[in-house]
Amino acid sequence: MDNSSFLTDKEILLLFDDARVAAKQASTISYEMLTSLKEYIQRRIIEA
């Protein structure tokens, strides 16, 4: 996965709605999408 940067004045930033979809677009797997996030980034799983 390549590096990404996001700048916002908002308190919450949604990086991706579905890790599987984001992974497919990045030609990788959802596990890599989730585990490559830095440890200080809060993760929330929201059931639809």
Image (spheres, rainbow, N blue to C red):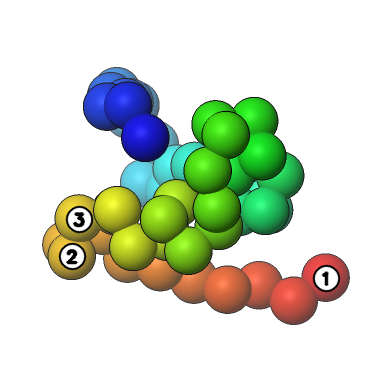
Q: On the picture, is 35 further left or further right than 46? A: left
Question: Can you say whether 36 is above or below 31 in the image?
Answer: above
| Mark 2 crowd level (few <14, some 14–19, many ≥20, 10 Å Cα) | few
The location of residue 28, given as percent across then percent down, is 52, 43
Q: On the picture, is 20 further left or further right than 34? A: right
Give the residue at mark 3: 38
Mark 2 vs 3: CB contact within 8 A: yes
**Callout 3: SS:** loop
Front label number (1 vs 2): 2
Among numbered discs 1 and 2, the one appearing first in the sequence: 2
Give the residue at mark 2: 39
Res. 14 in view? no
Give the residue at mark 1: 48
Question: Can you say whether 9 is above or below 32 in the image?
Answer: above
Between the C-alphas of marks 1 and 2, the distance is 25 Å
Q: Looking at the picture, which amino acid does disc 3 mark?
A: Lys
Mark 1 vs 3: CB contact within 8 A: no
* Figure quadrant of residue 48: bottom right
Q: Residue at x 55, y 53 (%)?
A: 29
**Callout 1: SS:** loop
Q: Residue at x 74, y 76 (%)?
A: 47
Q: Looking at the picture, which amino acid does disc 2 mark?
A: Glu
Q: Residue at x 64, y 30 (%)?
A: 25
Mark 1 vs 2: CB contact within 8 A: no
* Figure quadrant of residue 2: top left
Res. 6 mark: none
| Mark 1 crowd level (few <14, some 14–19, many ≥20, 10 Å Cα) | few
* Quarter that holds the N terminus: top left
Q: Looking at the picture, which amino acid does disc 1 mark?
A: Ala
The location of residue 12, given as percent across then percent down, is 43, 48
